Each structure stands twice: as structure tokens, then as C-alpha cells.
Amino acid sequence: MVYEMAHIDVIRGREADFEAAVSKAVPLFTRARGCSGVELHRTVEQPNRYVLMVKWNTVDDHMVHFRESADFQEWRRLVGPFFEKPPVVNHTEVAVG
């Protein structure tokens, strides 16, 4: 299992619109090859900062199969207007747990 962690800063005052757009986009992830879940976390101390966490079977499921799909383009169309700057994306795997 690989976790995609996308750190997203949203334009201040647009947080509710961003969250609504992510809600619409959840099915794009859940139907993607190798995706087994998606969550959006909001930072308590900085309410316009989010972490999108997506569980993938492999990095390729995210970086090849999803990122090269029409569903990824739709994701960016839905949420891109709310980005303050480009997201920073990392992939992690459980080291202890």
C-alpha cells in the first residue's frame, strides 16, 4: 500500500468551495485502478491548508494510470481554480505500524 499525500494551499475564503469540489471529485479517485480510499484533511492551525490522502496499491496506479487519465484532468478542472500555489505531492509507505 502506498499513500499519496498532496499538500494543498487554497486561496483564503475559498475553503468551502474547494471542499465542495473535492466532494464532487471523490468518485474520480474511487473508481481509479488501484485506489482503495481517499480523505481530505484540513489543517487546524491553518484552515486554508489541506492534505489529500489517497491509498494506492502502487505508485504506478497513481502516477501512470490515474495521472494520465481523463479523470485526472477532471479532478484538476474541479479543484485547480482554488489552489493558491501548485500542490506538493509525496508518496509514503508504512515503516512502522
Image (cartoon, grey):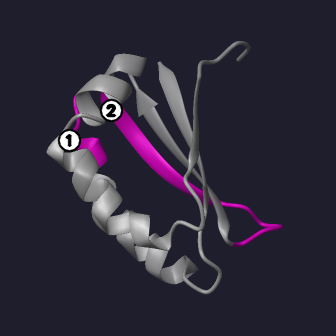
The reply to whether dot 2 and dot 1 touch (C-beta < 8 Å) is yes
The residue carrying mark 2 is: 35
Q: CA distance from mark 2 to mark 1?
A: 7 Å
Residue 21: x and y in percent read 37, 71
In the figure, residue 20 lies in which quadrant?
bottom left
Dot 1: few (<14), some (14–19), or many (≥20) neighbours within 10 Å? few
Residue closest to the far right: 45
- The residue lying at 19 percent from left, 39 percent from top is 69
Residue 31's tag is: 1
Secondary structure at badge 2 equals strand
In the figure, residue 88 lies in which quadrant?
top right
Quarter in which the C terminus is drawn? top right
Secondary structure at badge 1 equals loop
Q: Which residues are magenta?
A: 28-47
In the image, taking residue 16 as reference, residue 66 lies left or right, namely left
Residue 41: x and y in percent read 61, 57
